[in-house]
Image (tube, rainbow, N blue to C red):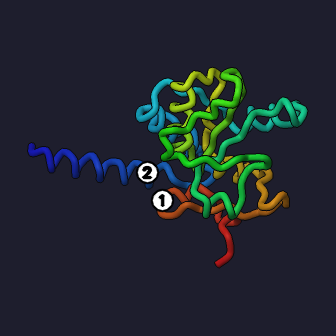
Amino acid sequence: MSQWSILIGVGLGGILAMSSVARAGDGAAARLRPMISLRHPGIEWIDTTGLAAVMEASDAGERPLLLDARTEAEYAVSHLAGALRVDPDDDALDPTDLPRDTQIVVYCSVGYRSAAVVRRLARAGFSHAYNLEGGIFEWANEGRPVERDGVRVAEVHPYGGVWGQMLDARFHPAD
């Protein structure tokens, strides 16, 4: 079998796997985690229930630092309260002004781009950096709050294509 045949087969297999994963509200986040872990092994995770509990139980000063690893356009539609946007492709990401034991939770749409950020933070010495399992899609699908300009909103950027199917249609912005 040629290298091209193998690459095409792997690519088509990945597309088929993603299409079987991407349906809102059917446990898609749990099925994505092993795939993401293959690409980003050894990262730490937190699920939406765990993050919600930490945020509810903590004073504002004790809450984890939330980093949104989506594009500016995605962040502009909505984000988790208090989240700061970071560029997931910025290899120089290293908030050196933070203590290395700062609790950090990074999220994106489904957890893939954020996993890369968590991995870079761990390499930089941050011992409590976590990837949000299921990302903002899982968070919103569970009815948890997102905001824009400090005001709670119902919309989340659907990212597009197959991935957008993981976000319940009621959270897609109106055209």
User: What x and y, as percent, mark residue 126?
Assistant: 62, 24
Q: Residue at x 51, y 56 (%)?
A: 163
Instruction: Residue 110: give its label.
Output: none
* Foreground residue among 157 and 62: 62
Q: Amino acid at mark 2?
A: Met
- The residue under label 2 is 18
Q: Amino acid at mark 1?
A: Val
- Mark 1 or mark 2: name the one nearer the start of the chain: 2
- Quadrant including the C terminus: bottom right
User: What x and y, as percent, mark residue 150?
Assistant: 84, 57
- Against 45, is 81 above or below? below
User: What x and y, as percent, mark residue 118?
Assistant: 56, 33
Q: CA distance from mark 1 to mark 2?
A: 7 Å
Q: Say left or right for 164 vs 174.
A: left
Mark 2 is surrounded, within 10 Å at the Cα level, by few (under 14), some (14 to 19) or many (20 or more) other residues, namely some
Q: Are marks 1 and 2 in contact (CB under 8 Å)?
A: yes
Q: Given the current orientation, which residue lies at the most extreme left position? A: 1
- Against 84, is 158 above or below? below
* Foreground residue among 100 and 165: 100
- Against 75, is 85 above or below? above
Q: Quadrant of residue 127?
A: top right
Q: Given the current orientation, which residue lies at the most extreme bottom position? A: 175
- The residue under label 1 is 162
